Image (spheres, grey):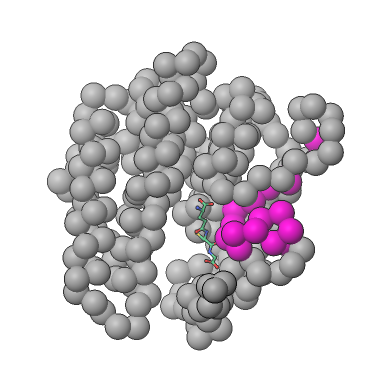
Amino acid sequence: MIDLYYWPTPNGHKITLLLEELAEAGAKLDYRIVPVNIGKGDQFKPEYLAFSPNNKMPAIIDHAPADGGEPISVFESGAILLYLANKAGRFFGTDTRQKVAVNQWLMWQMGGLGPMSGQYGHFTVYAPEKIPYAIDRYTREVQRLLGVLDTQLATHAYVAGDDYSIADMAIHPWINAYDKAPLDLSPYPHVLRWQADIAARPAVQRAYALKTQVNPDAGKPLTDEERRHLFGQGAPKS
Ligand SMILES: N[C@@H](CCC(=O)N[C@@H](CS)C(=O)NCC(=O)O)C(=O)O
C-alpha cells in the first residue's frame, strides 16, 4: 500500500495521473490518499516534515517496497513519478534512449515549466500588489516554454516520443494552471492537440475528478489564513 500525501494542485495531480493510469494499464499500485491541506498548514506539521522536509506536497510512503524492506518515503513530484514508474515498469520508456527522452522532459518540467508557471500564477493571481515587471517576466518565460513544447509536439505524439509517459503527466497539469489568469494557447496548436488527447483518457478524468472530492473549496479565493500558510513561510535561517 502506498500512502499518497496529496492536495489537489498541479503538483499533486501528477501523482494521481500516474497511479490512475497504472490501474488502467493493469499495473495497479494500491494507494490511499492522505490529504495535506496546505491552506491549513498541514505541510508544516513535524510528523510530515519528518519525511518531507521541504514543507511541500506531494510525498509518498510505500509500505511494500520491491525489496521487501522498511517503508520507503519519497518527496518531490519528479522523484515520486520516477520511483513509481520504475516500480511498476511502466510509462518511463523501455530502453536507454526512451528513458533519456522521458527524463529530460521530466526535468524540463521540474526545473522550467513548473517553477516559471508557479511564479506567473503568484504574480498575476495572488500577489496583493501587481508588479508589471514580474508579471511580464513570467508571462514571457511561460510563453517561451510553451513555444518549446509546441515545437516538440509538432513532430511527436507525446512529449518524449510515441508513448505517453510520466513526462506528459508532469506537464499536463501545468498547462494553463490558473483559471483566473488564462493564457491564450492559440499560438500553440500542437500543445492544444496534445492537451485534448490526454484530457480524454479515462484515467486522467478520474485523477482530475479527485480535485473537488478532496477539496470542495478548490477554485475559491484564498482566505487570509490560507495566504499566511502559503506565502508567509517564516524567515530563512541566518
Ligand atoms: N518541487 C516540488 C514543488 C511542490 C509544491 O510546490 N507544492 C505546493 C503545492 S503545488 C505546496 O505544497 N505548497 C505548500 C507551501 O508552499 O507551503 C515538487 O515538485 O514536488
Outermost residue, left direction? Answer: 187
- Whether the magenta-drawn stretch holds residue 51 is answered as yes
Q: Is residue 213 visible?
A: no
Q: Nearer the viewer, residue 50 or 26?
A: 50
Q: Nearer the viewer, residue 49 or 228?
A: 49
Outermost residue, front direction? Answer: 238
**Residue 17, image x, y percentages:** 53, 42
**Residue 60, image x, y percentages:** 68, 47
Range shown magenta? 48-64
Q: How many marks?
A: 0
Identify the image quadrant of residue 203: top right
Q: Is residue 122 above or below residue 162?
A: below
**Residue 61, image x, y percentages:** 73, 46
Residue drawn at 20 percent across, 42 percent down: 147
Q: Is residue 161 visible?
A: yes
Q: Is residue 195 above or below residue 137?
A: above
**Residue 54, image x, y percentages:** 59, 59
- Whether the magenta-drawn stretch holds residue 227 is answered as no
Q: Nearer the viewer, residue 128 or 185?
A: 128
Outermost residue, bottom direction? Answer: 224
**Left or right, 18 with reference to 125:** right
**Left or right, 128 with reference to 72:** left
Residue drawn at 52 percent across, 27 percent down: 91
Q: Is residue 83 above or below residue 142?
A: above
Outermost residue, right direction? Answer: 69
Residue drawn at 57 percent across, 40 percent down: 79
